[in-house]
Image (tube, coloured by chain):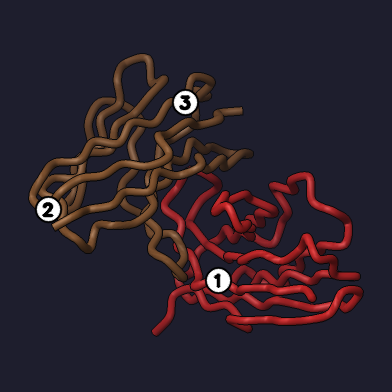
Chain colours: A brown, B red
Amino acid sequence: LAKTTQPISMDSYEGQEVNITCSHNNIATNDYITWYQQFPSQGPRFIIQGYKTKVTNEVASLFIPADRKSSTLSLPRVSLSDTAVYYCLAGGYNKLIFGAGTRLAVHP
Amino acid sequence: DTAVSQTPKYLVTQMGNDKSIKCEQNLGHDTMYWYKQDSKKFLKIMFSYNNKELIINETVPNRFSPKSPDKAHLNLHINSLELGDSAVYFCASSQGRGGREAFFGQGTRLTVV
């Protein structure tokens, strides 16, 4: 099972870059790495997904080293509205395992 | 137009009752999920259906029974509700099995008293 481990919480300030690392030592060959964002009283929202190397979209970048045992979500120039819980997910055909989530607090 | 909708949004019921939560998606996805989020915010998958076929059935009490009448619907029926069942239940859908971008509903907050 690709269990994931993330920091429980992080603090940042507006305009800074935030990097959240997720450990998934037992990731399977077919597993993708996906990150979700969750605001209070809402369902998780997809941010980005990757398999290896680097993936970038309009809101974030995802860095995955060659051994795929970890991944790093990078949020450029965060704002107050990025305050949320971020979940790392390593999943494949038969298992979808969410990490405990990282509570990111962005301060003015 | 909501992509994944759950009803009800809030559900308060007494121990021992039977209740259902409905979920519908209008995204044309072939895979649907039920997740449980407890008070500590841990998200755990309960069930997953692909084309109406059960593909993930985690260690969930038999009191929980999912039903998928068609690809667009996945309902969750819970028998003999217990205090420990109190949580937020999320429905989600995706195209393809596991590890793909999933769209979540707004959640159903179940409180058992």
Label 2: which secondary element? loop
Q: Residue at x 63, y 39 (%)?
A: A94
- Which residue appears at 42% of the width and 20% of the height? A69
Callout 3 amino acid: His
Foreground residue among A12 and A90? A12
Indicate the position of residue B72 as horizontal and vertical percent values: 59, 73
Residue A56 placement (x, y as % from top left):
19, 42
Left or right of B9: which side holds A71? Answer: left
> Label 1: few (<14), some or many (≥20) within 10 Å?
many
Q: Which mark is residue B107?
A: 1
Circles 1 and 2 on the same subunit: no
The residue at 31%/16% (across/down) is A66
Q: Rounded to the nearest whole Å, what is the CA distance between mark 3 and mark 1?
A: 27 Å
Q: Nearer the viewer's eye, disc 2 or disc 3?
A: 2
Tag on residue B61?
none
Label 2: chain? A
B38 lies above or below A24:
below
- Label 3's element? loop
Q: Which residue is mark 2?
A: A14
Checking the image for residue A24, the label placed there is 3
As shown in the figure, which amino acid type bears the numbered disc 2? Glu
> Mark 2 or mark 3: which comes first in sequence?
2
